[in-house]
Amino acid sequence: MIVELRIKNFKSFREEVVVSFAASTTSKLSGNLLRQRNGERVVKSMGLYGPNASGKTSILDAMYALKTFVLFSSQEQKPTSKIPFFEPFALEKTAANSPSTIGVTFDLDGDRFFLEVSATPTRVHKEILTVQRLTKQPSRKSAKSTLIDRTWVQEEEAYETVLHKDLGPDLTRAAAIEQTTQNRLLLGKLASMNSGLAGNLIKWFDDDLDFYDMHRNPGAESVMLTETAKLLRDDDQFSALIKQFMKDADIGIQDFQIADEKTLKAEVSELDKKVEFKESIEPGITFRHSSQDGSEVFFPRHKESSGTLRFVALLVAILKPSGRRRFVCIDELGASMHPELVRRLIRIVHSSVFNQLGNQVMFTTHDTHLIEPTELLRRDQVTLCNKDRFGRSSLKRLDVYQDSARSDANLQKQYLQGRFGGTPKFGVTLEDVPVDDKPLEVCS
């Protein structure tokens, strides 16, 4: 379960920003929350709103960069390999040459971990990992233990490193410090050396942190639907649930079949780095539709609408069976889907009947219907992104406007009016586009 995300000097975020999942004190829509045994509450979903290019997707990118670097570090790497996706703020010279910092606080197996990484594309500058055991009494807090504290000291051209004994025997920790290169995290190196604690954290990043960006990355759709086909083929109970959702979604699908199909997969040759397409067999989905005369017709997925495919893939992504609570990041949640269908997806996230483990979802969207006065999202489930004239993004959660936004206020209307920020500031040509009051005369 994610509690907080911190970002600094990453893409459009020059100054540090915080995406907090901690719930406010209001008792409204309590079913949208997860409650810890100590009484602490966090939201199940977070919607990221704001103008185009305001930093919404960059928040998801920060989570993806951290996940990728953690997994990258758990594998052997050449010392010259670039650290993936750590991109500093480029519109200021000092920032462009400084490390990006990404930190996440999450709960796992009764413990609260905080991992923060500061890095440039060529070097880790700071790596901090702490743990705190969650107690049953809210007033009692266990002390934080620092598991990893690794800092690059420029003057000495060396790292100062402290590793906790919980990460392995003395010899293992000493070897990890000596063998970890500048472009790799100690956490990943320790996992590769069979540290149980490090390995469990790597597993969380690998298995429990998922990303879905079908809107921006066309290749992701094929990957998602192949994964969907595998899950539906291997789990009859889950397959029956998804089938019922499809029938009830008014998208014309009555049933589906899973069958192997030939696909072409792009692979990069290690020898000459050329892209080669190789044929492979992957499970695929065909969808059954009923015709007026009572006959049945099966459509392969390429004949279905993009909205239909997106609904099916995201439904599976949110609910797929797992032994642990998952965190799902979705870019442009409402792309190609009817607003009412999107609303149902969010209700599924908040429903303990379907989302029994309490999987969390963070999504970007421009769909203001989700914050209209029908009480689908709480104010603490909406984060607003803005960008100033120097290209620097900032964040505010909607609940900070509690005084100016009454409990019965039309939040959708106020948002579109710019009451909370998060809306475009148009220049002259777009601010007052002339509207014709008579037909345009055209030549035949």
Image: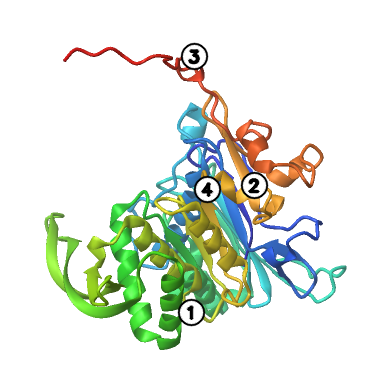
Mark 3 and mark 4 lie on one chain; the one further toward the N terminus is 4
Which residue is labeled 2 in the image? 372
Q: Is residue 283 visible?
A: no
Q: Nearer the viewer, mark 4 or mark 2?
A: 2
Q: Are marks 3 and 1 in contact (CB under 8 Å)?
A: no
Q: Nearer the viewer, mark 3 or mark 2?
A: 2
| Residue 39 location, quadrant | bottom right
Does dot 4 land on a helix, a strand or a loop? helix
Q: Which amino acid, by three-letter code, is at mark 3?
A: Val
Mark 3 and mark 1 lie on one chain; the one further toward the N terminus is 1
Separation of marks 1 and 4 at Cα, in angstroms: 26 Å
Q: Which amino acid, by three-letter code, is at mark 4?
A: Ile
Separation of marks 2 and 1 at Cα, in angstroms: 32 Å
Separation of marks 4 and 2 at Cα, in angstroms: 24 Å
Q: Which amino acid, by three-letter code, is at mark 1?
A: Pro
Does dot 3 land on a helix, a strand or a loop? helix
Pinpoint residue 31: horizontal percent, then vertical percent. 70, 67
Which residue is labeled 3 in the image? 428
Mark drawn on residue 59: 4
Q: Is residue 163 above or below residue 281?
A: above
Is 253 placed left or right of 101 in the picture?
Answer: left
- Image coloring type: rainbow
Which residue is labeled 1 in the image? 321
Mark 2 and mark 1 lie on one chain; the one further toward the N terminus is 1
Q: Residues within 10 Å of mark 3 (few under 14, many from 20)?
A: few
Pinpoint residue 380: horizontal percent, then vertical percent. 70, 52
Q: Residues within 10 Å of mark 1 (few under 14, many from 20)?
A: some
Query: Nearest the camera: 363 or 292?
Result: 292
Q: Are marks 1 and 4 in contact (CB under 8 Å)?
A: no
Separation of marks 3 and 1 at Cα, in angstroms: 52 Å
Q: Residues within 10 Å of mark 4 (few under 14, many from 20)?
A: many
